[in-house]
Amino acid sequence: MSTGVDVGASRAHENYRIRSADIWAFGVTISAQSLSWNNGFTAGFGSFLIVALLVGAAYVSLILCLGEIMSALPFAGGAYGLARCTLGFTAGFLVAAFEIVEYIAYTATAMTSFTHTLAYVAPATNLYQPIIWFLVYIICLSIHIYGAAAFWRLNYFFAAASLLPTITWIVGSIPYLDYKKQLQLDVMFIDGFSGFMRAFPCATWLFVGLEALNTVGDEIKDPRIIVPKGQRFAIATVFCTGITLIIISGGLPPGIRAWPDVMNTWTSGFSLIFQTTDVYSTYPSVLGPIGTLYGFIFAYSKLLTSVGSSNLVSKHFQTRFFKNETPAISLVMGAVVAYFLCSMVYI
């Protein structure tokens, strides 16, 4: 693999110029803040808020460090590219293997979350989950294979589908906040230090995927400026919305002890704002997991392609097809593994 990024970028992306706004939207899309973060309330409001601030600060530091490195040494393949350039083949291969498994698992998690949400609003779809997985993967893969222009333009749609309902939920929920009723002393810190530590994995769901933004480096003509700038805007947006989600949730029903059992965190606020049922209030949550899935398909395909170009796995993973020169084998193989993971959960 090349230690740097081709300044001219690849021919596959000449028809679309990626800007910092695209990187920002990609960060909002892939994070989505729609997956299981509310389980952190099992530790209590105070503990979870502190944990989220700590995890958020860690992600801010990570993104700033990645941006600093990218501005000095643009590299393809995300963290794998960095490890390959600085630590050699062995460390690079291990980092790539772990990240590929992680990103594919994230796509499977997002897919099952989507079908569970869909089954809640349309119970008849529960029996057809494997078919829905297949169709969604086919659609997402088709968009990726079609080329960069289609991918990045649709990326804005998913970013809007994630961010606009979040802002609406936050602003619209303010008149219904009742911290005096919802935040009693017994729900501030639950299970002490043990509960505090268990909340850490839940808090990461508020910022998940932001570390994958630098996988875009080899598609951009000037990654030294565009990628770090987009990363900074993305982490600023996600950090602000993530912490605000926790603070607003603390003042809304059903209360801290019941929040971990809520399927979709927007349901309570939207039910109050629009005076409607929980089912209708869940509709805005349907597209969030699809955005996460959509983003991680891009991320794992970039890693598989980079590893293939380094001959650490079969070189066929780097082979590009069709007029847009997309890595179809990397895209499809990752989706096949993710589908298998979904099937294990379903069975």
Image: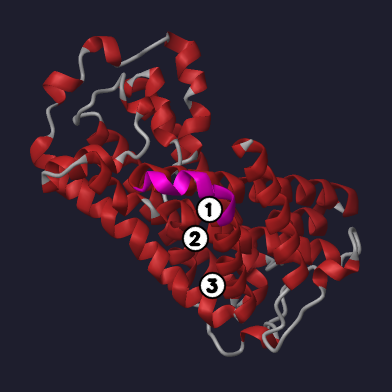
Given contact means CB atoms under 8 Å apart, are the residues at marks 1 and 2 in contact?
yes
Quick one: SS at disc 2?
helix
Considering only order in the chain, which callout, 2 or 3, is on the residue closer to the N terminus? 3
Q: Which numbered tag is attached to residue 28?
A: none
The answer to whether residue 313 is above or below residue 342 is below
Residue occupied by mark 2: 231
Amino acid type at image mark 2:
Gln
Residue occupied by mark 1: 210
Q: At x 36% / y 57%, what residue is drawn?
A: 162
In the picture as drawn, the residue positioned furthest to the left comes out as: 175
Give residue 109's position: percent from left, percent from top.
56, 44
The image quarter in which residue 326 lies:
bottom right
Distance, label 3 to label 1, CA atoms, is: 17 Å
The image quarter in which residue 56 lies:
top left
Q: Is residue 188 visible?
A: yes
Distance, label 1 to label 2, CA atoms, is: 8 Å
Quick one: SS at disc 3?
helix
Secondary structure, magenta segment, majority class:
helix
Give residue 35's position: percent from left, percent from top.
45, 42
Distance, label 3 to label 2, CA atoms, is: 10 Å
Residue occupied by mark 3: 225
Q: Which residues, given as a range, are shown in magenta?
A: 122-131
Q: Is residue 1 visible?
A: no
Q: Nearer the viewer, mark 3 or mark 1?
A: 1
Quarter that holds the N terminus: bottom right
